[in-house]
Image: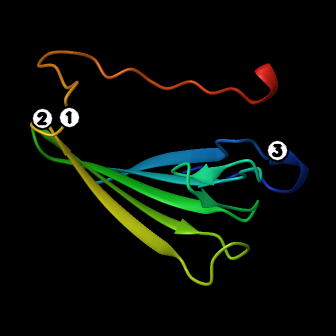
């Protein structure tokens, strides 16, 4: 796949720069280039050194598994990880045949 931009080509933003690829049936998202306004999951501070690897898999028709590894040597002494399972029985707004809509966030109104 393509690499992340570097140097002046990598303009830090709130949501960073992400590259996705498939590893079998798992979507892997590699993100860098965050500005220091980002707080991981709204609670954990970060720096412009933040690097997130996300893995999204679907072990069965009604289950999504989300895993993330957070690496930010400017904020933490070592990388840390989390795993969340979302199933049709735990997601109150999961509607059979319904759509999941994207979340849009823009920096500086651009």
Report the front residue among 15 and 10.
15
Which residue is rendered at x = 53% and y = 76% of the image? 79
Label 1 to label 3, Cα distance in Å?
35 Å
Return the disc, 3 or 2, that comes first in the chain's sequence.
3
| Residue furthest out toward the bottom | 77
- Up-down: is 30 above or below 61? below
| Residue furthest out toward the right | 8
Label 2 to label 1, Cα distance in Å?
5 Å
Q: Secondary structure at mark 2?
A: loop
Estimate the x, y position of residue 37 in percent, counting from the top left: 74, 48
Q: Residues at badges 2 and 1 in contact (C-beta under 8 Å)?
A: yes
Residue 110, visible in the rendered structure: no
Estimate the x, y position of residue 30 in percent, counting from the top left: 53, 55
Classify mark 2: residues with Cα within 10 Å, few (<14), some (14-19) or many (20+): some
Residue bearing the label numbered 3: 11
Q: Nearer the viewer, mark 3 or mark 2?
A: 2
Residue 80, visible in the rendered structure: yes
Classify mark 1: residues with Cα within 10 Å, few (<14), some (14-19) or many (20+): few
Mark number displayed over residue 91: 1
What's the image's color scheme?
rainbow
Q: Quadrant of residue 44?
A: bottom right
Which residue is rendered at x = 65% and y = 70% of the image? 72
Residue bearing the label numbered 2: 88
| Residue furthest out toward the front | 43
Q: Secondary structure at mark 3?
A: loop
Label 3 to label 2, Cα distance in Å?
38 Å
Classify mark 3: residues with Cα within 10 Å, few (<14), some (14-19) or many (20+): few
């Amino acid at each position: 796949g393509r690499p992340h931009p570097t140097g002046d080509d990598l303009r830090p933003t709130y949501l960073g720069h992400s590259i996705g690829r498939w590893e079998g049936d798992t979507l892997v998202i590699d993100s860098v280039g965050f500005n220091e306004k980002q707080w991981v999951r709204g609670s954990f501070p970060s720096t412009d050194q933040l690097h997130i690897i996300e893995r999204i898999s679907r072990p069965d028709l009604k289950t999504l598994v989300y895993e993330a590894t957070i690496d930010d040597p400017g904020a933490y002494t070592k990388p840390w990880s989390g795993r969340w399972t979302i199933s049709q029985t735990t997601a109150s707004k999961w509607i059979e045949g319904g759509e999941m809509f994207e979340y849009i966030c823009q920096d500086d109104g651009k």
